[in-house]
Image (spheres, rainbow, N blue to C red):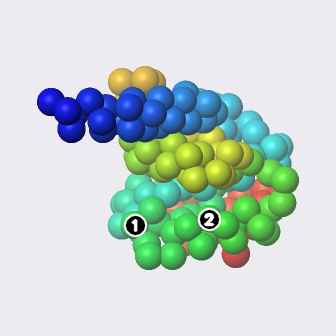
Amino acid sequence: MRILAKISPFFALFFVLATSAYAQATQMTPDEAYAKAYAGEIVLVDIRTPEEWAETGLPDVALQNDLYAPDFIQNLLAIRDQNPGVPLALICRTGNRSGNATSQLYQAGLTDVIDVVEGVAGSGVGPGWFKRGLPVRASDAPVNAAITTVQP
């Protein structure tokens, strides 16, 4: 019991820090993400895998960065550096991976990250990018020509 009393403040602090960081991370819908990416107000980054991109395509305004690649963080930082001052918005299939990644990045000090809820395929939160009828491109096609963000 004494050991529990000694470590419980640590867990309480960890819980508060983890939940407060997640609560402060910004979220937006796919409609908002499309409009803001098209306007150059965010950099939309699809963090799904190359296999997922090949199977379904991806938002035509999104850059690509595989969450499971060993150089994911380096690539994300390169995207941020190529597009200075523009927040990064992450999207995945259903919003789970982007939510977790956004939360962890926020906790690590990268506070200009946004979670695109619903993802591309939809979730309990909403229908997602595809069912909303937002523009999609093939994984090997270039990003929408109107987009000013740069894929390193």
Are there few (<14), some (14-19), or many (20+) residues within 10 Å of tag 1? few
Are there few (<14), some (14-19), or many (20+) residues within 10 Å of tag 2? many
Residue 15 lies in what quarter of the image? top left
Q: Is residue 137 left or right of residue 16?
A: right
The answer to whether residue 146 is above or below residue 121 is below
Q: Element at badge 2? A: helix
Residue 58 in the image, given as x and y percentages of width and height: 52, 55
The answer to whether residue 42 is above or below residue 1 is below
Kind of residue sitting beneath label 1: Tyr
Residue 50 lies in what quarter of the image? bottom left
- Judging depth in this view, the residue of 71 and 132 nearest the camera is 71
Please tell me which residue is depicted at 38% across the width and 32% down the height of the picture: 9
Kind of residue sitting beneath label 2: Leu
Residue 65 lies in what quarter of the image? bottom right
Please tell me which residue is depicted at 66% across the width and 52% down the height of the picture: 110
- Judging depth in this view, the residue of 1 and 22 nearest the camera is 1
Q: Is residue 134 left or right of residue 13?
A: right
Residue 117 in the image, given as x and y percentages of width and height: 51, 33
Label ID, residue 76: 2
